[in-house]
Amino acid sequence: MAQIDANRLIVTRCEGLIEAEVGGELMGLNIANGTCYGFNPTATRVWQIIERPRTLAEICAVLTREFSVDAATCEAEVRALLDDLAGDGIVRLS
């Protein structure tokens, strides 16, 4: 993903992921391509946060309060996750 300011990068879920929580983690099936996903606890939390469109800064603000992570590391890791999810058509970045 291009380096867009975290306050301007809006993350929106796309339609088409059938999801279920299993043992505190999210399992999802992308109905468009048949891919199955297993989200770790942090990715599960990101998915919960983006139930409605959020900026990257909003996502990271929640995560840095809830997890023991500094802001720079959080942003880098969340950007990488979102880039992967956007590549699979699960989220839209704008």
Image (tube, grey):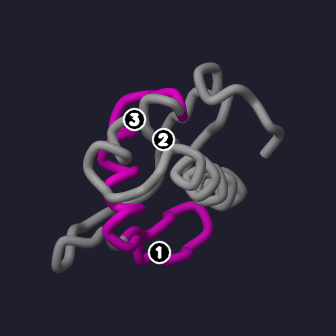
Q: Is residue 66 above or below residue 26?
A: above
The amino acid at mark 3 is: Ala
Q: Is residue 82 above or below residue 26?
A: above
How far is the residue under mark 2 from the one under mark 3?
19 Å
Q: Which residues are magenta?
A: 28-56
Q: Residues within 10 Å of mark 2 (few under 14, many from 20)?
A: some
The structure residue drawn at horizontal position 54% and vertical position 34%, both measured from the top left corner, is 56
The structure residue drawn at horizontal position 52% and vertical position 42%, both measured from the top left corner, is 14
Within the image, what quadrant is residue 91 found in?
A: top right
Residue 81 location (% of width, % of height): 59, 59
Q: Residues within 10 Å of mark 3 (few under 14, many from 20)?
A: some
* Residue situated furthest top in the rendering: 8
Residue 61 is labelled as 3
Of mark 2 and mark 3, the one earlier in the sequence is 2
Callout 1–callout 3 Cβ contact below 8 Å: no
The structure residue drawn at horizontal position 36% and vertical position 47%, both measured from the top left corner, is 63
In reply to whether residue 41 is colored magenta, the answer given is yes
How far is the residue under mark 1 from the one under mark 3?
25 Å
Q: Which residue is mark 1?
A: 37
Q: Which residue is mark 2?
A: 13
* Helix, strand or loop status at disc 2: strand
Depth order, front residue of 3/33: 3
* Helix, strand or loop status at disc 3: helix
* Residue 52 relative to residue 22: left or right: right
Within the image, what quadrant is residue 7 found in?
A: top right
